[in-house]
Image (cartoon, rainbow, N blue to C red):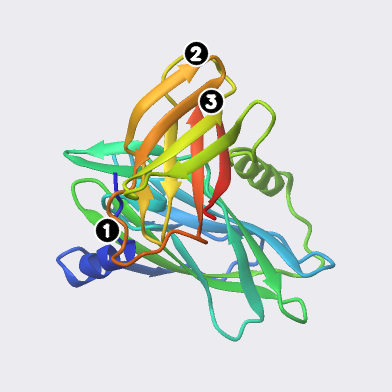
Amino acid sequence: MIGTLHHSRVSALLAGTLTLALLSGPVAHAATSDWVDNDGGRMRLVALAPDAQGHIRAALQIEPQPGWITYWREPGESGIPPQVTVKPMTGVTLEKASYPTPKQITVGKIREIGYDTPVTLPLEFRADGKPPTTLDLTAFVGLCKDICIPFQADFSLSLPADAQPTPRELALLDAAKSLLPQPPSSDFSLQSHSVSADAKNLSLRLTLPDSGGDAPAIYVTGPSGYVFFQQSNGKREGATYSADIEISKLPKNYEIKGKSWGVLVVDGDRAMETSLAFE
């Protein structure tokens, strides 16, 4: 399964008949903003004051309305991936946005990757110089049901240096972190990977934590805007699982040698994420 470039999807959505919900969150004088709402759901920002090294721990909470969905970083055949943009000249840089384990969601004949329940995206920022007193950013997500609504909100969150996080805020950030895929371990890892001579299939060999059960879900993220998850030839042999992933429609003249892709494997209630280096 090939995901098309999501940049063109977003442009098409914005240029079409879909409604852009552009809302501004009020300045908050605590570590949690107010909720910003639109027809498909709501979102808010949670952040802690910078630590001694200038790191800011934060999270974006997204709550789709019942029956609506939002998207993973690579949304599949359609959809809008989340985007967080720090406002210029604020002295803050977004270092990392993380994503809890998603699921495949089928809408008609379209297969997408995302979330149909509330999700919290952990965010890591860095102050470039003097610790900032506010965190100013724009969050842009997609919320879809019968139609897709691009949902954009501006947040300005006060970060007093002496502010102490509440137990609720710490629990929320810790819970979001606990739902992230784990790095490889002795019982859950990538053994090997190879690309076919015609560059149409990627063969994976994995160690799984469960020696029985259904085939794991596998999401391979290639060039930006592409995700592959169509499996064939899946086979379990004890704790080892092998499968081929179709990658037949890469960008024109794309050279895979020397590139690094990502792979997320979901087996039962565990998820593992690692990289694929192509020599």
Q: Which quadrant would residue 117 be assigned to in this image?
A: top left
Q: Nearer the viewer, residue 57 or 1?
A: 1
For marks 2 and 1, give the one nearer the viewer.
Answer: 2
Q: Secondary structure at mark 2?
A: loop
Q: CA distance from mark 2 to mark 1?
A: 40 Å
Label 1: few (<14), some or many (≥20) within 10 Å? many
Label 2: few (<14), some or many (≥20) within 10 Å? few
Vertical side of 274 occupied by 186: above or below: above
Q: Nearer the viewer, residue 192 or 7?
A: 192
Inspect the image, locate mark 1, and give the three-letter code of the amino acid beneath it.
Ile
Residue shown at the point (26%, 70%) measured from the top left = 11
Tag 1 residue: 149
Q: Which quadrant would residue 249 be assigned to in this image?
A: bottom left
Image coordinates for residue 148, horizontal then vertical, percent: 24, 55
Question: Is residue 117 at all visible to an observer of this figure?
Answer: no
Q: CA distance from mark 3 to mark 1?
A: 31 Å
Tag 3 residue: 269
Identify the image quadrant of the C terminus.
bottom right
Image coordinates for residue 92, horizontal then vertical, percent: 65, 76
Residue shown at the point (38%, 35%) measured from the top left = 244
Whether residues under marks 2 and 1 lie with C-beta atoms below 8 angstroms apart, the answer is: no
Q: Nearer the viewer, residue 170 or 78?
A: 78
Whether residues under marks 2 and 3 lie with C-beta atoms below 8 angstroms apart, the answer is: no
Q: Secondary structure at mark 3?
A: loop
Vertical side of 123 occupied by 112: above or below: above
Inspect the image, locate mark 3, and give the three-letter code of the amino acid beneath it.
Asp
Identify the image quadrant of the N terminus.
top left
Q: Which mark is residue 212?
A: 2
Q: In terms of sequence position, does the residue under pointer 2 or pointer 1 come before the other?
A: 1
